[in-house]
Image (cartoon, grey):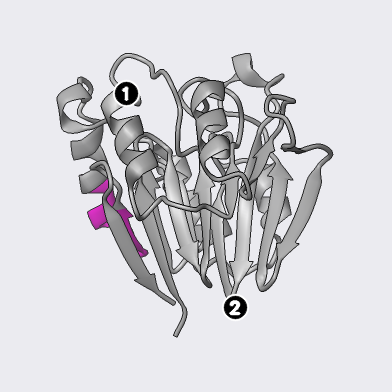
Amino acid sequence: MPEVKITLSANAGVCIQAAGKKIWVDALFSGADVGFSPMSPELAQRVLASETFAEPDHIVYTHCHPDHYSRNLAQRAKDKWPTARVYLPEPEIEGQVLLSGNEMCITDGGLTLRFLRLPHEGAQYTHVKHYGLLLSTDGCNILLPGDCALASSALARAIGDTKIHVAVLDFPWITLRSGRAFVEKEIHPDHVLAYHLPFAKDDKNGYRISAAKAAQSMKNDVHLLLEPMQTETIKI
């Protein structure tokens, strides 16, 4: 039975371990809006020193907003693990893979990384180059749409009939009615991991409580990624 381990750094940063590979997605970043949690220098050092995050095979950034990306920290990770492949939709790091077009597909042994150009949430961000990620390995499909616009028809088209076993989603996909409906009708994953949530000390808007209540109301198996270095193990 395939097993997937997903570990939170902060915000929407995770390390995914599957089929002997480690894939970072938005794992090291710099800033955050009020009411959310930034990547403190102490936490960044903790991530870089962590055995869980060590020796990534792939370092992915969905887009270059400061709550998802830091050039300095991305470069530090690349310098520490020079064999890791770095993926960005903007030219930022020497030797990176530049994400472009509507879709890119990368294979690494039994792992496939399918990058999907998706609209960013919010009309003010329509110009942002933003890519979701669909990971496939061992018959398991893991979807991370990043900051994709809620209930996006572009995401529905990109997924098509693909069976989604694990969906790692920004928390409004479960707290807002339109998001929940889309998850259940269009994505219909076996497991949901909700993130992009603030740590308790930063949660000025009660997002954590709202997410916990929403998780209980959903038909899917829902886990909340709430704390730094929290790991969830999913058996497919």
Span colored in magenta: 213-223
Q: What residue do we see at 16% from left, 31% from top?
A: 200
- Locate residue 224, reporting x and y percent: 28, 50
Rendered-image quadrant of the N terminus: bottom left
Residue at position x 70%, y 55% in the image? 114
| Element type at mark 1 | helix
As drawn, the residue found furthest toward the bottom would be: 1
Q: Hey, what amino acid is under mark 2?
A: Gly
Tell me, yes or no, whether the two marked residues, 2 and 1, touch with CB atoms within 8 Å.
no
Camera-near label (2 vs 1) is 1
Q: Amino acid at mark 1?
A: Pro
Judged left or right of residue 235, residue 84 is right
Q: What residue do we see at 22% from left, 37% from top?
A: 208
Measured Cα–Cα span from mark 2 to mark 1: 38 Å
Q: Is residue 182 magenta?
A: no
Q: Nearer the viewer, residue 173 or 67?
A: 67
Query: As displayed, is residue 204 above or below residue 14?
Result: above
19 vs 110, left or right, is: left
Q: Would you say residue 219 sits in the magenta stretch?
A: yes
Label of residue 41 in the image: 1
